[in-house]
Image (tube, rainbow, N blue to C red):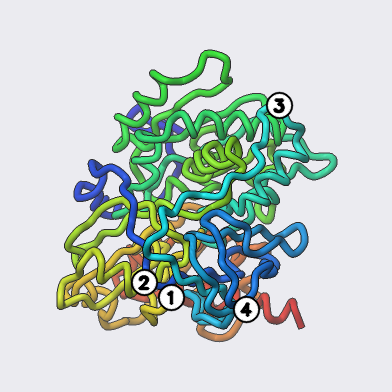
Amino acid sequence: MRLLGLKTFRHGIHPGEAKDATKGLAIQQFPFAPRLVVPLAQHIGNPSVPTVRPGEEVCRGQRIARPEGHLSVAMHAPATGVVRDIALTPTILGRMSLAIHIEPHAASTQEATPGTPCSLDAGPEEILRAVQEAGVVGLGGAAFPTHAKLTVPDGKRVDTLVVNGAECEPYLTTDHRVMLEQSDDLFVGIRYLLRATGAERVVIGVESNKEDAATLLRDRLPADLPVSVEVLRVKYPQGAEKMLITALLGREIPSGRLPIDIGAMCINVATTAEIGRLLPLGSGVRLWGITIGGPAVRRKGNYRIPIGTPLRFVLDTVGVDTSVARVFLGGPMMGNAVSSLDIVVTKGTSGVTAFTDIEAEWAHRRVFPCIGCGYCVDACPVFLNPAELERLAGSGGYAAMRSNHALMDCIECGSCSFVCPSHIPLVQHFRVAKAAVRKADAA
């Protein structure tokens, strides 16, 4: 579908972009905290298993936890130091997770431990193992292990890889900077992806507010790569997997199905660049690029931050306004509000966004009954009826919400909540309903 000459999808919303403060700032190294806490469950699936003990010295980049089964990844030391403890730590989801606590050596040069490089000529299985050992996960919120996502099941085929450079979430600009600063890593990563999946072509989707990135990628595109760069209309949630594939390929993913069922696979641009940076060196994920911004942050920017950095240290380092009232891991639309500053930055963190009490007032507005305006229906990018789902959620009708995949098709983008004039927190109610359905399934 094209609107104003640019590819896009139907429905969606247009929240303020709020990217001007950081989109022109290069990614810079963030300092090491006095203690780094590396959770063993930074991804969906089985937690990693520690391979170190308290009191043991570790080198930066050293593997400190191994994968536990296929749906799991390795963990690596973000800094040279000593393991002080293996103990529980709070997470953004409200649960406790076992974590490796490392005290970095203040006088260390923090040079990374070299690993075994993965050749670009390696076979698919070898590349997938290297991605798993590197500890790479996606930025889709659930931090799905990338090697598992890249595994093509028997009987399936991928003809097109979609590399997601839309970055439609307000305030976040790291993907934009990655495309500008790490184009070589991105193209190397694409070579690995093509070998691993057997895809025939790659389409990189970039929103029109990142035209400079699209131009640079086109100018530097290697002649032997079957890659095209497509500019998309700025609209939220353009970066959602289903929306992006529909906009770029004109294919709709059926209810209850996955992109691979229509011959496509979608992977984030930063994740792709990370693969291209790590695998030639045989390295593991030690740092993660995130945007730290929002009205309450004084030194806004894009940072390459050590995994396991406590949020309290992050905010103390960049400085925040005294009226800071609300902090999100991620952006304001799909991010999660934090309940404790002891939570740490993990591989699935796309940003840290802090708001003052002025902006936080918006989240505490009085909720009124639904007036049947239909704004939520017009906004929903997957064509659900949020008002009807809300009515069922209020009466505990979770089974009815699930019928025809209606509830589970919700991508939790928050578009319905954003446009609701009654201020009903629709997406939060849908998350509760999903949790109840999953609990019933497990029982």
Location of residue 436 (image quadrant): bottom right
Where residue 33 appears, as percent x and y from the top left, is 37, 68
Q: Are marks 1 and 4 in contact (CB under 8 Å)?
A: no
For the point 44% across and 40% down, the residue is 165
- The residue pinned by badge 1 equals 343
Q: Are marks 1 and 2 in contact (CB under 8 Å)?
A: yes
Callout 3 environment at 10 Å: few (<14), some (14 to 19), or many (20+)? few
- The residue pinned by badge 4 equals 398
For marks 1 and 2, give the CA distance.
6 Å
Q: Are marks 2 and 3 in contact (CB under 8 Å)?
A: no
Q: Please, what secondary structure does the residue beneath circle 3 have?
A: loop
Residue furthest right in the image: 154
Where residue 356 appears, as percent x and y from the top left, is 19, 73
**Does any portion of residue 403 appear in the rendered image?**
no
Foreground label between 1 and 4 = 1
For marks 1 and 4, give the CA distance.
31 Å
- Mark closest to the chain's N terminus, 2 or 3: 3
- The residue pinned by badge 2 equals 311
Q: Residue 121: give its label.
A: 3
Which quarter of the rendered picture does the C terminus lie within?
bottom right
Q: Amino acid at mark 1?
A: Ile
